[in-house]
Image: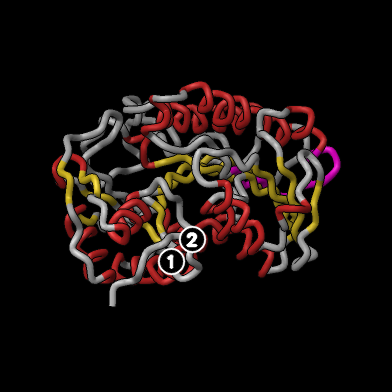
Amino acid sequence: MKILVTGIAGFIGFHLTKRLVREGHKVVGLDNINDYYSTDLKYDRLAELGILRESIVEENIVKSCTNKNLQFTKADLENKPLIDHLFDTEDFDVVINLAAQAGVRYSLKDPYRYIDSNIFGFLNLLEGARHHSIKHFIYASSSSVYGGNTNMPFSTKDNVDHPMSLYAASKKSNELMAHTYSNLFNIPTTGLRFFTVYGPWGRPDMALFLFAEAMLKGDPIKVFNYGKMERDFTYIDDIVEGITRLIPRPPSSNTDWSGNNPDPSTSFAPYHIFNIGNSNPVKLMDFIGEIEKQLGIEAKKNMLPMQPGDVPKTWAKVDDFFDYTDFKPEVGVEEGIEAFMSWYKSYYVESKQYNIALPS
């Protein structure tokens, strides 16, 4: 297939693209390489894909120097003329939208970025799909949409009308916009609610990265809600496996759907929402303990109250996803943290990007 992957320089987009080109798909990647976190890390991910920093020209197509099936363009999703041009010239079979302004807490600081990228940008992609007979439109939603919901585990059949941040609201908006286009234009759309994704090449604003960095530097880690948090940590390889299994399986109409008892996860239109999570929430203090064990360092802990926009617990109900794909995420935190630490030490410590010594 020929696949548009947005957010290719991001954590999930990078890993998914590696998998897709390895399987022989043709991929056109798009990313604006914004400065929400280290652009060096984003450029290094692209370099792993054969997209060299010095070859990138804004809004121009660049070919990978290591894989003939991969091309890249640096551009904003909200650049409608460029998005229209890509759809007009590239003849995509599938769109996978992983690009977004990420981060719950950052949405309190710069809300306009979320509207530009997550709403206007998403609309441009839907419009492209509308006019070019896309076989499957897959997009990243988030576990954040569950917001004030306390019914555990989180189910895609639950109501999600009480977001706790603008980031979450933008992701819920994406689901509503996708349904509208599925209904009006018969575009098969699948939304994926990711649960705390981690692993090698991960985001520097996420807990595992922040904890490892602080502990290796001898700095205290910030432990919110006084450690009374649980997260459904999901390893990156499980996320990629789930997405690749969904690509050839676009949704169809749910003939049992009823407006008298509407199922939010399916529709009379070709529309589906899935959770992708490990379905095994881990207590934050246990997560920190595993990092301490693998680093051989006891963390200095700064115990703090809950942050605005955050929730105390996430837990994904994934039965419908397992039934649909015959796959259930399976990598546990011990194995996942070990893989992350191996990459982290190689990339940041042994390469001398940080002037710190590894514990003996």
Q: Which mark is residue 349?
A: 1
Above or below residue 213? Residue 170 is above
Residue position for label 2: 353
Q: Is residue 3 visible?
A: yes
Question: Alpha-carbon neighbours of circle 2 within 10 Å: few (<14), some, or many (≥20)?
Answer: few
- The crowd level at tag 1 (other Cα within 10 Å; few <14, some 14-19, many 20+) is some
Residue 87 is a magenta residue: yes
Q: Is residue 1 left or right of residue 293?
A: right
The magenta stretch is 86-97
Q: Quadrant for residue 294, please give it.
A: bottom left
Element type at mark 1: helix
Distance, label 1 to label 2, CA atoms, is 6 Å
Q: Nearer the viewer, residue 204 or 227?
A: 204
142 magenta-colored = no
Residue plotted at (56% across, 45% down): 98
Quadrant showing the C terminus: bottom left
What percent of the width, then of the height, locates residue 285?
17, 55
Check if mark 1's residue and mark 2's residue have beta carbons within 8 Å: yes
Establish if 40 lies above or below 307.
below
| Observer able to see residue 248 | no
Label 2 residue SS: loop
Q: How many marks?
A: 2
Question: In the image, what residue type sits under mark 2?
Answer: Gln
Identify which amino acid the numbered label 1 is placed on: Val
Q: Point out which mark residue 123 bears.
A: none
Is residue 105 left or right of 115 when viewed as pictured? left
Q: Quadrant of residue 68?
A: bottom right
Q: Quadrant of the N terminus?
A: bottom right
| Residue at x 68%, y 29% (from the top left corner) | 124
Picture coordinates of residue 132, whole percent (x, y): 78, 38
